[in-house]
Amino acid sequence: MAATERPQRRTMGDRLYDAIFSNRVWRSIFRSGYPNTPRNQMLAVATNVFLHLHPTRIHRTHVKITHTFCLGGLSFFLFLGLTITGVLLMFYYVPSIERAYEDILALETDVRFGQLMRNMHRWMAHGMVLTVLMHMMRVFYTGAYKPPREFNWVVGVVLLVLTLLLSFTGYLLPWDQLALWAITVGTNMVGSAPILGEPNRFILVGGFQVGQAALTRFYALHVIGLPLLAAVFMTVHFWRIRRDGGLARPL
Amino acid sequence: MAATPQAQAQPSSAAVRGRQRRAREEELLVWPDLVFIEFISAVLFTILIVILAVMVDSVLLDRANAAITPNPSKAPWYFLNLQELLLHMHPALAGVVVPTVALIALGAIPYFDTSNEGQGEWLSTPNAWLLTKIGAGVGAVGTMLLIFFDASKHVQIYEWIANGELNANPDSPGFVAWPSWLSGIENMAAIRDNIAWPEWMFNVPLGDVLRTDLLGFPRVELDWNIPAFLVEQFIPVNTMIGLPLLLSFVAHRAGWAKTKRDHMVLQFSGFIAVYITLTIVGTFFRGEGLVLIPYTIFAHE
């Protein structure tokens, strides 16, 4: 595609780029040139591990905001934001029933931006439940679950459950009255199942009532177990979007 | 500045050239046309979340204390729909069976609606939007009516109209009460408690009926309470399966729903509306003792 490589008029951006980035170190990281030609723009997407989740070209209708409302992307964005704020919160939090509540209090009063981090984490968590639910509705109403995307819909339902579980396990961690009783009510629901209910509740809570064992388990699930599982399913979910031919569009 | 993708090499054959151009003209490059949208929306939402986080602090109540049960005790908001269901039926049914079946049914949608027509379009069938509205409307209103029934609101409204006065004193002379012959339908529990069921129905020894011991299995040691079974399991299950089926049947007979996709849209919209209604009622309209509020409107002293 020789025509695409015809040099265009050098802009100020090009000159600046050349001045700063034409060196061995930069070129060793980003191999494609400045993305101002179609070729380099496609290379910028195809040669970047993160961007190559995308194809290099997409159909015109797929960038219309009203086609997707960005809901799947927003859910992923919130997941990333929750990971970042979550790691920062972990610096100040010890999952022990003696310390957890005091750690949250200290986080809110003594830690610079601690309250902000906690607020962001909580709002993003609520937001993610909402965006995942709305993403499911978008996919349903646009018929995007239809063949060949059946299995990706199932993966999506699993991700919805994982999102709810992530939120639910995080709910206990502040170890305040809201946390304790919400988890008590929630786990009692599990316990009401016939035959398997009570053993499952016991495994989840690690005892007969919500205490240290429950906090340890919920913490481990919240910060590592469920996020890893969600990451695995997200990988499959995103990969299947590409494999199944991108976003659904009319035949 | 972004170059347009038009500057392409020209393939030799005219037919290939025409086909390629037609397909290509409908396409955009991901960089910049999608990546920038994603970037801008990420920036906007970061700002939005920071503003929200600055303005509204997260809740932190008193230290957890297993000795003090708050009234009401509620699950996280996205489980309040289940907690609301729990008030109306057997806990195993509301807490486990319904969510499990709902999730499996949700996951199975593409295996029921197997046609690949109409994908990638919002509400692609001619009646889809109508069916969305019908499903959502019937789901929301139906759920509210069922909740009102179980909270005896119909009794209170009857007494309000009959006495011409809201929350009239039942001890006052001339008070018109809900007719006693209808006491069996004051609410769900009344079906079990206020109807004169024959005494034996409360205590059916299943072991005597099923006789599994004759087959060499252990004898069933269970006394079956039929009125309680009716109220806690039979009626709720049949309501939850029967009403959606009835809705689909009506939509089919009325000619609104013609394809599987139409029925899917109807049922899914109904499900979402029920889910949202139960969540809203569970979140905002359940006060102390999980009594339906605003109880002052229809308070029954």
Image (tube, coloured by chain):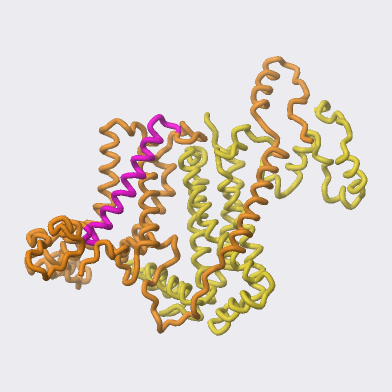
**Relative to the observer, which residue lies in front, B250 or A66?**
A66
**Relative to the observer, which residue lies in front, A140 or B299?**
B299
Q: Is residue A160 left or right of residue B250?
A: right
Q: Position of residue A111 (x, y in %)?
A: 67, 75
> Which residue shows up at 63% across the image and 59% down it?
B50
**Relative to the observer, which residue lies in front, B52 or B194?**
B52
Most prominent secondary structure in the magenta stretch? helix
**Taking B251 as reference, is B218 above or below it?**
below
Q: Give residue A43's quadrant in the image.
A: top right
**Taking B1 as reference, is B88 above or below it?**
below
Q: Where is residue B59 in the image (x, y as percent from the top left)?
A: 52, 70
Q: In this view, does B275 lie to the left or right of A143?
A: left
Residue B64 in view here = yes
**In the rendered picture of this protein, how many numbered marks are placed on residues?**
0
**Taking A59 as reference, is A77 above or below it?**
below
Residue B226 in view here = no
Q: Where is residue B51 in the image (x, y as percent from the top left)?
A: 62, 59
Segment tinted magenta in the rendering: B124-153
Chain in yellow on the image = A
> Which residue shows up at 89% across the image and 44% down it?
A16
> Which residue shows up at 69% across the image and 72% down it?
A112
Chain in orange on the image = B
Magenta run includes residue B213: no
Q: In this view, does A211 lie to the left or right of A123?
A: left
Magenta run includes residue B135: yes
Q: Where is residue A171 in the image (x, y as percent from the top left)?
A: 51, 69
Q: Quadrant of the N terminus of chain A?
A: top right
